[in-house]
Amino acid sequence: MPEDSDDRRPEDELREMLQKFLSGEGPIDPARLAGAAGMPSDPAQLQALMAQLQAALARTEDGIDWEASRRQAAAVVQRDPGSVSSAERDAVRQAAELAALWLSETTDIGAAATELQLLSRQQWVDATIPVWQEMSEPVANSISDALTAAMQEHAPEEAQEMLAGAERILRNVGGTMFAMQLGNVVGQLAGETVAGGDFGFPLLEGTAALLPVNLRAVAEGLEIPEDQVRIWMSARELAHARLFHHARWLRLHVLSSVREYAEGIRIDVDRLEELAESFDPTNPDELREALKSGALIPPKTPEQVETLARLETTIALIEGWVDAVTETATARLPKRESIAEMVRRRRATGGPAEKAFGTLVGLEIRPRRLREAAAFWRTVTDAVGAEVRDSLWDQPDLMPDGADIDDPSRVIARLQGAGELDEMDLALQELLDDAERAEGEAPAPAEADDEPDEDSGEDAPPQR
């Protein structure tokens, strides 16, 4: 028997209404809404979007369906998966082997992390999307909450009861829309990325990786022999992986800072309410512009500014060290300066997908002060040598700060005095060891020590 309409729950009514809309039976054209959200509007992609949103309606769990990100990223990659010949892969492997040898002459740290993986665009997506999700989750939750609140606030009176009991459905749909936007961006990033360390963030844990299909595109745009580009990029990627392999604390340090920053982001509800009041379904340009420009993300709080400054300094120090080490390791390459300058320009400007991620999450993924940080590491290397220089990565409290980048003299003075301090520490440790040995060699107190001699009142002599 059909369910009595009077017994239907409010969320069932909302689910039915949204399902009709997603089937094209509603007053809003789904293609226009997809365009407003920055999603692809070709028929196949639009059908996939509608299917994902319908799946969100059927979900019983609360929260964001991050699998929607993975599926959307895969769909973007499949438009242009790229192909690499066996000969091209062999050429990259040979370049990586030579780069590893040269790098070992420059730094001893992380020598075990010398294997370099060759990834397709889809493999890169699969390997990195968990980190993109981790960085985006606080913003996704904030947007989902804000959209739900705005919709409930401005819904017609007759729809208030229906929306009041359907918060989970609204959150699921809003979260799925965000997840698919993220997947769209990550899929586009897969077409721009050359190496695992391209963005400074530790997307790949303890792994060096190159995308040969994108490396080829970079090399084709330069009037430089491809083998030199392969060697230089391999050296840089291996240096990045070696650093994170050596400083095991560094990855968590960076990602925790990103998370701390992202958790401070709150959506501008007033701006969202203005859009909700004035939104014209037949002309979604205003909503599209708000999403594209990041207008829904308000200015940074003082706490966020402080966190972001620390994060940018950390990323600049990482990238600066990698640049300085790569420069030394590739000194034999005639065109190394041209390649390095090309990479610096790419990092400074970024591609369209990077800008889209910055808008979506409110976090630029390009570090600043790269040249200053690289100059800092060169100055330190000249003063104390590579081995002492690299000791700064041994512990978090040894890592330089922004003031040190501006003036390396304090760090250099500390490192130059490290030998004397080490000798003092060793001497003190030797004294402590001698005292412990003396205590250990002293005869154990006899039982009579605890029981004084009744006749003399003194300790009984030790038994022979």
Image (cartoon, rainbow, N blue to C red):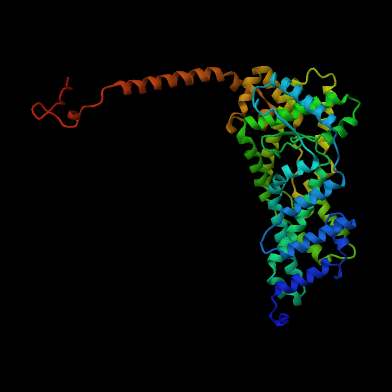
Residue 321 visible in rendering: yes
User: Residue 291: horizontal and vertical position, in percent?
Assistant: 81, 54
Q: Nearer the viewer, residue 378 or 439?
A: 439
From what the image shows, is residue 433 above or below residue 161? Answer: above
From what the image shows, is residue 170 above or below residue 411? Answer: below
Among the 4 quarters of the image, the one containing residue 198: top right
Q: Residue at x 79, y 68 (%)?
A: 19
Question: In the image, 47: left or right of 325?
Answer: right
User: Residue 61: horizontal and vertical position, in percent?
Assistant: 66, 62
Among the 4 quarters of the image, the one containing residue 429: top left
Quadrant where the C terminus lies? top left
Q: Residue at x 89, y 58 (%)?
A: 43
Q: Nearer the viewer, residue 452 or 203?
A: 203
Q: Residue at x 87, y 44 (%)?
A: 80
Quadrant where the N terminus lies? bottom right
Count numbered badges in the picture: 0
User: Residue 138: horizontal and vertical position, in percent?
Assistant: 68, 52
